[in-house]
Image (cartoon, rainbow, N blue to C red):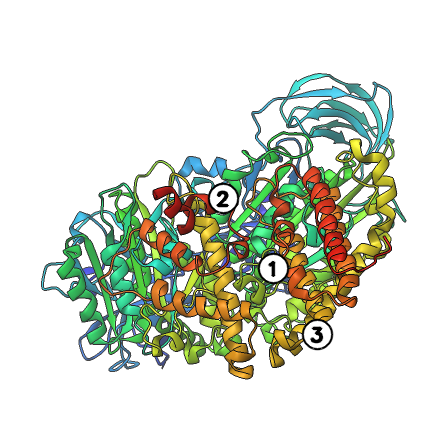
Amino acid sequence: MSLEERVGQIERISGTVVDAVGVKDIEIGEVVEVGDERLIGEVIRVSKDRFTIQVYEPTSGLRPGDKVYATGRKLVAELGPGLLYNVFDGVGRPLHELLKQGPFITRGIKAYTLDRKRKWYFKPTVKRGAEVAAGDIIGTVQETYMIEHRIMIPPGLEGKLISVEEGEFTVEEPVALLRTKDGREIPVKMYQEWPVRVPRPFQPEGRLPLTEPLITGQRVIDTFFPVAKGGAAAIPGGFGTGKTVMLHQLAKWSDADVIVYIGCGERGNEMSEVLTEFPELKDPRTGRPLMERTILIANTSNMPVAAREASIYIGVTMAEYYRDMGYNVALMADSTSRWAEALREISGRLEEMPVERGYPAYLPDKIAEFYERAGKVKVLGRPERIGSVTIIGAVSPPGGDFNEPVTIHTLRFTGVFWALDPELAYSRHFPAINWLKSYSLYVTSLLSSWATSFSYHAEELAEWWRKVAPSFPEYRSKALELLSVAAEIESIARIIGESALPDDQRLILLTAELLKEGFLRQNAFSEVDSFSEPEKQVLILKMILDFHSIAEKLIRAGVPIERIRSLPHISLMMRVKEDPEKVKAILRLTEESRKALLEIAEEYGVKLEV
Amino acid sequence: MVLRLEDIPGLIYRGAKEIRRSLLFVEGVSGVGYDEMVVVRAPDGIDRVGRVIEVGRGFAVIQVFGGEMGLQTDIAVKFTGSTFKIPVSDEVLGRMFNGRFEPIDGMPPVVSDDLRDVNGSPINPAARVYPNNFIQTGISAIDGMLSLVRGQKLPIFSESGLPHNRIIAQIARQATVLGEAEEFAIVFAAMGLKNDEARFFIEQFRESGAIERSVIILNLADDPAIERLLTPRIALTVAEYMAFDLEMHVLAILSDMTNYCEALREISAAREEVPGRGGYPGYMYSDLATIYERAGIIAGRKGSLTQMPVLTMPGGDLRHPIPDLTGYITEGQIILSRELYSRGIYPPINVLPSLSRLMRSGIGPGKTRDDHKDVADQLYDAYSRGVRARDLARIVGEMGLSERERRYLKFADAFEKRFVNQGEYENRSIDETLDLAWELLAMLPEEELVRIREKYIKKYHPKYRAAAAS
């Protein structure tokens, strides 16, 4: 059947939802082109005599009777070299390519995700005559300085390579020829397509336990509420609580190999910030521009709603593709609420029965499907390798109230909850992650490996590190306990006033303040402290808690709290995170503040067993 | 834009099936495009403009602007074949229009072949320049702690009875970019404003001479509510033209967005759509985004478009859908407080929940001053401690506070009275604002200033400055 026969007509237009008739064998999920401008759309409902399309571009001017062209294809992502260091819209068009039509995004522009003219140097890793199957790596391309792109046999393909060539190719030129068992000869190109709504396959039973932390350099996350490589985390918060800055921080500093950042229904200026900043920022591990490992998907809030819905799937499919090469990929989605609202809006136009707050009944399924695409897996093909996708989703609950469908269902399917707190944000305590409400289900499995998983920073400290690391989980739980006790004391202090409290409780308040100011608070825009090395995290924590335990003994022996509070070391401990000497400065201050306390002990004649 | 039935070629359709408020249901039509503009003439002889909001084979739903009174099913309808477009040229400067872009200043309509769709198109994020030019408004609370930059969208969240109009007028009067002589051109869109409120603005623009560089689009409280859906879009289409074609620096003031949202809800209800929170339609976020996102700077064009929408929070509730959705789209918010105002503080800006997301990029060495960021952080920290101490003092009395808490309480009082509070015609430079901040911070012991780097304490703290001077 030729394509010409699969043309239908528009029946009705309501916003981005269009009803059409005339293509009998149309399928759910099939991509269609609508009207003379051939606007891209996807079939979302089929009945006996008509079908419904969600259109990814503004529909102004479409008329009943206009043609609808079925393409026979699903909504796919083009996967190949050229994704990194690039920015795409919600349906995978490169934004720099769209710039050729002017600074505004107009309708009906067609552009391939991957540049068809650009040449890549393909270096085979297998020889002619090799038997290959889905997922096998047949060669590599140096996509950016940081990332080697591994060219794989697409899922579903198997056979013998009858030729393979080294050299410069575009993504459309075959680099190898494969003969299948039934004798067909299929050219293998450097790119493949994959339907975005279907998870890419990995080895059967290939899901692995999550034991390795994603090091983010953010103290409140790494130390208190860590996320595993391959895990899923949710970061809900009302506006102005710092979701976006937090996600930017994670995109910048996470020790993943590849970052996929989806701006879903958010601000245009924010995407422009990422586009300006990332090429200039250096990766702390390789010293290369962060953009070299980053893919951006930008669907700003004023772009069509349907494309917003698609952007999440395009992004996660790209993430899975790099996972399949054997990389650790981290995906940030800002914000999944906008995606859920797009679902709601489309559902409303379809006149589906709404459930909670107007959301369709299948909302939890959609959220679960998305977060389940995270994971650490044995991927298909040879050589054997392991890859992971970590998903971090921002949630924007209306009115900052977490008791709403998107937040509730997201928490069901993610393992980490970073609760953003407006009170903290108002006093400019960032990151405004509330340490009493947040949790991480990965803590137990991660804490032991946490301390040994960043040797690249700790070379000169390796020996020392091996001794300190095991006690780290104790420090962590001690700190959390102190903070939680402090919260209780504070609520009492709010009634009777702080000066009426006994000194041991006031010490706890002082330590809690040290923890908040000196440890938890971390300036995303500080040159020194934006990324906090794991050993720095441990040392600050140790410094504060060691100080506390000696001070506690002094207080018990009758030393007044004012005497301890008046130590200049208090404000130094709050500032030492900004010291460019980092670890050295912290070790020095730990020793000095210890001495200061011992001097007080002598002054008051207190005997300490140290 | 004045359109008469006779001016449009094509078929006239007679008769409507149903009229529901401002929605017109017509049948037997063909070739009608979605979002197309329509001219409707009722037996009263008045031509009204409308827009197709849903279309199918043989039927169309039309939203009629310009008031539904007088509409009958015996009606003549003509489809224009194009979306709602307005003519733009440099003749728009200094002009005043109503919510349908018809002149209301007694001058002839704007004539131009350059027609622009009022819906605009999204700016390609890759074409944007990240905004980083500090705008000095002369208001300490804003310049010091909520700095506005060119190309930002920063709304004012207010309540009925608060002086948001006076503040906006003061900003419009005083706003300058440091080191540049060029003044802002102003596009003012009034949605459902009272007559005297609108008049106040026009007077202000006249007095300051800004009227020559202004375009005013008025939809007053007694004008058709439905036109409020069009008003901000017309204003922003003009503003985009001025910013990106005429290369001017434009400040667009949209007041009051609450009235816009209510018009949106009205239409949604008339269409019997599934209501969302507060009865507002589920797509209100996307709809507001198509307004607020029309701000910014485009690479290769000289001008810029800065937006300051105003909205009154119904019941003073920050969690109400209108401020809530706005806050998620705009780059911060300036929140006014009735409590501060009743204590005689003008402008009554509550800085704690207020925020400017683009502040960081617009301040610092070479832009404002090297200590700006640290000082702002320290002010936030100290003021929030002071406010907490004040709450506590209400329970335990001031005597129950610790020495430290009392100091912070004193700081908070001084901060409100001297830093936030200022005259309506007082224009403080950024240096004055920051020096004033230091004067107040000096009330606190030096070791409490942990958010300010030592080098800046040494450089700017009055104590060291005095020492250096003597």
Q: Tell me where residue A451 sits by quadrant.
A: top right
Percent coordinates x, y for residue B45 in the rendering = 17, 76
**Which numbered marker is on residue A502?**
3
Viewport quadrant of the N terminus of chain A: top right
Dot 3 or dot 1: first in sequence order is 1
Q: CA distance from mark 3 to mark 1?
A: 29 Å
Asked if B171 appears above or below A142 in the picture, the reply is below
Q: CA distance from mark 3 to mark 2?
A: 49 Å
How many residues crowd mark 2 within 10 Å: few (<14), some (14–19), many (20+)?
A: some
Q: Position of residue A517 (x, y in %)?
A: 62, 56
In which chain is the residue bearing label 3? A
Q: Nearer the viewer, residue B76 or A515?
A: A515
For the residues tagged 3 and 2, is the chain the same?
yes
For the residues marked 2 and 1, what is the alpha-carbon distance in whole angstroms?
21 Å
**What SS does tag 3 mark?**
loop
Q: Specify the amino acid type for callout 1.
A: Ala
Q: Residue at x 27, y 43 (%)?
A: B245
Query: What residue type is disc 2 on?
Result: Glu
Residue A273: mark in rendering:
2
The disc label shown at residue A432, or none: 1
Does B308 sit left or right of A401 as displayed? left
Figure check: B295 above or below A132:
below
Tell me, yes or no, if residue B315 can be seen here.
yes
